Image (cartoon, rainbow, N blue to C red):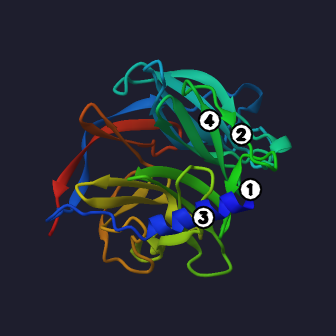
């Protein structure tokens, strides 16, 4: 087993040295909200866990095997105990429908697998062939669960009977998102550490199989976005990366709430969006925790409501930026 892990690690290291081909004369594009928002979810009834302070925050959206759209959100400040967080699910027939149907609590932390009580954070799902893979945080680790229908997920357990894939290098490892580039998976996530600088940062690891991951690379931290948060962890939350026209775009969150703000960067290198370096900065959007969805030739952006009492979607357009 140790030999197999070593071989996989060598493959990952070699894969990171492969240059990703860039399109000639790649044009930087600037994201722009196109039209009005429509609300797809509100603040749900959690039964015995309902709290006046609860808020739907980090979320994931994907299409299940039956064609329905799934929305799972981390609900924080609930009465579930521990770190107060759990996952709630909504379902929509169409991405453009308003007010998706509330489907109930989808997942709670399970301490028998080593998860922190009430520690579930930021679900993100990718589909491959007939399977769905959910990456999420358990307050200290990035974890993995799997589904055959995109609705019911079972934890993928390792030899330690844990769904944890990795943690660190900072504390409260959280907010994973995964993109596949050629034959390599890139997982972006963040963490914070109040005792060192930068206090918070976005990291990336790579893998060939979604189970064994490389050592972390700090891909974004500090800079102008690092001055936009009053909380030492908030200026690098909810990273979302997409590949478009030969370039890589990072959506980096700074603030939730009525003054919500997200900063975007565009880089030719998926492992470098700038650390205390704003050369790749392209703009901001007044949104929080955005996820970009491409469906039927159209890009959409999903984000939190400014009142932190639900989730909304709008069309997303792109305008040419400076060359």
Give the residue drawn at x 41%, y 58%.
261
Label located before the other in sequence (4 or 1): 1
Which of the two discs, 1 and 2, labels the residue nearer the N terminus?
1
Foreground pick, 105 / 69: 69
Q: Are marks 3 and 1 in contact (CB under 8 Å)?
A: no
Q: Do the residues labelled 4 and 1 touch (CB within 8 Å)?
A: no
Q: Residue at x 31, y 77 (%)?
A: 279
Q: Which residue in the structure is indicated by mark 4?
A: 146
126 or 281, which lies in front?
A: 126
Residue 104, placed above or below residue 83: above
**Of discs 4 and 1, which sits in the foreground?**
1
Q: In the image, 236: left or right of 244?
A: right
Give me the C-alpha separation between circle 2 and circle 4. Answer: 25 Å
Asked if labels 4 and 2 touch by Cβ distance under 8 angstroms, the answer is no
Q: Which one is in front in this view, the residue at disc 1 or the one at disc 2? A: 1
Mark 2 vs mark 3: which is more N-terminal?
3
Crowd rating for badge 2 (residues with CA inside 10 Å; few <14, some 14–19, many 20+):
many
């Amino acid at each position: 087993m140790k030999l197999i892990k070593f071989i996989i690690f060598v493959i990952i290291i070699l894969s990171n040295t492969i240059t990703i081909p860039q399109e000639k004369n790649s044009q930087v594009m600037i994201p722009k909200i196109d039209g009005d928002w429509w609300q797809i979810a509100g603040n749900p009834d959690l039964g015995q866990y309902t709290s006046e302070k609860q808020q739907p925050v980090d979320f994931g959206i994907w299409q299940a095997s039956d064609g329905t759209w799934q929305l799972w959100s981390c609900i924080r400040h609930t009465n579930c105990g521990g770190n107060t967080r759990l996952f709630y699910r909504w379902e929509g027939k169409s991405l453009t429908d308003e007010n998706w149907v509330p489907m109930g609590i989808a997942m709670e932390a399970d301490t028998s697998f080593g998860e922190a009580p009430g520690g579930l954070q930021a679900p993100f799902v990718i589909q491959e062939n007939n399977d769905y893979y959910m990456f999420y945080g358990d307050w200290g680790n990035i974890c993995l669960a799997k589904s055959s229908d995109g609705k019911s997920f079972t934890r993928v357990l390792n030899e330690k009977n844990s769904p944890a894939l990795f943690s660190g290098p900072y504390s409260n490892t959280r907010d994973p998102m995964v993109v596949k580039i050629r034959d390599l998976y890139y997982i972006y996530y963040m963490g914070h550490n109040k005792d060192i600088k930068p206090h918070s940062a976005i990291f990336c690891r790579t893998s060939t199989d979604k189970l064994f991951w490389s050592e972390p690379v700090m891909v974004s931290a500090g800079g102008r976005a690092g001055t936009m948060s009053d909380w030492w962890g908030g200026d690098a939350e909810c990273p979302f990366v997409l590949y478009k026209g030969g370039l890589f775009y990072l959506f980096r969150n700074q603030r939730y709430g009525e003054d919500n703000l997200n900063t975007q960067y565009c880089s030719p290198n998926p492992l470098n969006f700038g650390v205390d370096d704003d050369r790749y900065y392209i703009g901001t959007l007044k949104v929080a925790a955005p996820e970009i969805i491409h469906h039927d030739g159209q890009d959409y952006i999903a984000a939190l409501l400014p009142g932190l009492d639900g989730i909304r979607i709008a069309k997303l357009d792109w305008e040419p930026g400076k060359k």
